[in-house]
Image (cartoon, helix red, strand yellow):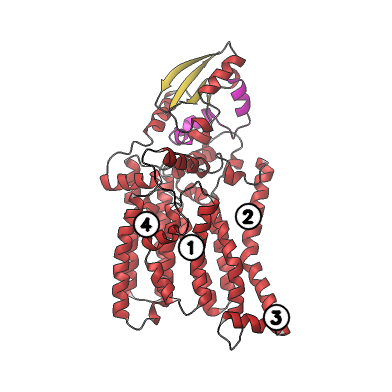
Amino acid sequence: MVLIIYYLVAAVYLNNLGYYNHESLFYIEKTRIVFDGVGARLKVMGLTSPMIPFMATFFFTNISYTLAPALASALGTGLLFFVIASTLIKRRDDDFFMYLLLAIFLFHPGILYTAASGKSTYLVLMFFFLFFLNLLKFYRSNTTFHVSIASICLVTLIFCDYKFVWLTLFFLPLVLTITIHSLNLGEQESIFRLFLSFNSPSLRRKLVNKTFALYIIIFALPLVAVLCYKLLNLTHASDLNYFNESPYATWNVLIDKLSFDQQTTNTNYQIPEISLLISARVLMFCPMILIAIYLFRESTYQILTLLTPFAFIEFLHLKYDKVYIAYQYYMVFLVLAFLCVMFKSQTVKNQKTFRLILAVTVIVQLYTGWYFLKTSPIAEDRNFLSVLTKRTEDETQSDNADIAGYINSLPDDVHILLDDATAYGVVAFVNQQKIKALTMPYQDNFLSGVESPDKAADYILIATDKNLVTGYTQLNNRYLVSIKRTLPQLVFKRVYETDNWIMFRVVK
């Protein structure tokens, strides 16, 4: 409870300083549509991705729309601590390890970022932790119940961040290794176990059946859940991957492109991330994972389990080569390393030296967490640390807030045409009463409004040439030129202007 209060104070304080990020603004905007909008709101609620973090903000909308994501992340991070601490008490009721955990959750800048930013990282960390926790429980008990729970956690993790669906690729070969180990054979080496199994008909049949059963238990539920969700997208949006590729459904499609474009065109050009060096960066960020690997050194298949997240982030770098590895993918190693230490710490003979090494490692991780956040190639990460340490007003979203303030001053009966693929930051600051005055792409009359603005809109929000997203929306200066050719009798009167946006009144 004290931690939750600590996180809530930090979240509210940063919010009052004007701190927002693209993910939290996207959730705020979509939540406003769901509760106050006009049109096909059910489609917005069902197809906005990631689904679980988005719906988690619903519980706090009665307090404040703009605070809801931050409140969700603060309470969620407190719950994450509770889950890890409860597991620690069951495994090893030792105050030293609780102090280490508390130090991480109090002072690690990545945890503070998770708790106060309104991002979905807290859910990713929670279900990533529970997934590997149940795998380790299965290794000890050989009970398929834990595999079933791990499968449910994996499904939830995928719906918190769809990129984790690729984690299943690296468990495909690992399942065979796990199955071989679970066979009751005198031989310890996996290669000899495999040789014995294939040369005995009964063992071969048992190996095949058990491997197939584990595949079904681990992967059937995630695959079916993703397939059903894709069919839902196909039914309502005519696109299987709408939730993952449309800027109207997820915030990171556009932001990832902008982030990479900004970095590669910046005068202070940063060297792109290089394969294998990403794993080296992980070891620098979380040296405790080396201790975890050392503790599991006697079990090949368990070490392979710990190495799957390394393969996962290397794959992400290759698959999404124009996207920087986000900070949250480094954070998962923090909870994984602590989980492994929690499981195997009692096997160490020299506890005094071991505890000293752990304490030093945690101190190093506090520094590297701060350093990685400060030098992150993603501007949002650096901005959070800047606002947190300098405690000055964040002007990043002032432009969106200004244009939203003008919209709030307009009469209630006007109709405003805007594209929330790029202007979701504006909609996030619009008053509850004015949401119904906005005509956006989720509504059926948006396309007719774009083609004939004189019949559907009193005002149009246009992205200026200075706006970084002007090339990603139809409503820009080029649109005005083309519509004037089509409807020369229309007059667009400029009524309000900021650096990134211009509000035009449609004179009919």
Q: Residue at x 61, y 37 (%)?
A: 40
Q: On the rendered structure, is 96 left or right of 149? A: left
Task: Give, as a three-letter code, the residue at label 1.
Answer: Phe
Disc 1 to disc 3, C-alpha distance: 31 Å
Q: Which mark is residue 204?
A: 3
Is the residue 73 above or below the residue 99 in the image? above
Q: Would you say residue 83 is visible in this rendering? A: no
Task: Give, as a three-letter code, the residue at label 2.
Answer: Val
Quadrant including the N terminus:
bottom left
Q: Quick check: is 452 in the magenta stretch?
A: yes
Q: Which mark is residue 244?
A: none
Disc 1 to disc 4, C-alpha distance: 21 Å
Q: Are marks 2 and 3 in contact (CB under 8 Å)?
A: no
Q: Are marks 1 and 2 in contact (CB under 8 Å)?
A: no
Task: Give, as a three-letter code, the residue at label 4.
Answer: Ile
The residue carrying mark 2 is 226
Q: On the rendered structure, is 176 left or right of 437? A: right
Residue 385 point in image, percent of width and height: 32, 48
Residue 410 point in image, percent of width and height: 45, 23
Task: Give, as a three-letter code, the residue at label 3.
Answer: Arg
**Of the two numbered discs 4 and 3 in the rendering, the one whose residue sits closer to the viewer:** 3
Question: In terms of sequence position, does the residue under pointer 1 or pointer 4 come before the other?
Answer: 4
Label 3: few (<14), some or many (≥20) within 10 Å? some
**Of the two numbered discs 1 and 4 in the rendering, the one whose residue sits closer to the viewer:** 1
Which sits in the foreground, 309 or 484?
A: 309
Question: In terms of sequence position, does the residue under pointer 2 or pointer 3 come before the other?
Answer: 3
Residue 137 point in image, percent of width and height: 51, 74
Q: Residue at x 55, y 56 (%)?
A: 158
Disc 4 to disc 3, C-alpha distance: 47 Å
Q: Which mark is residue 310?
A: 1
Q: Read off the magenta span.
A: 424-453
Q: Residue at x 44, y 61 (%)?
A: 279
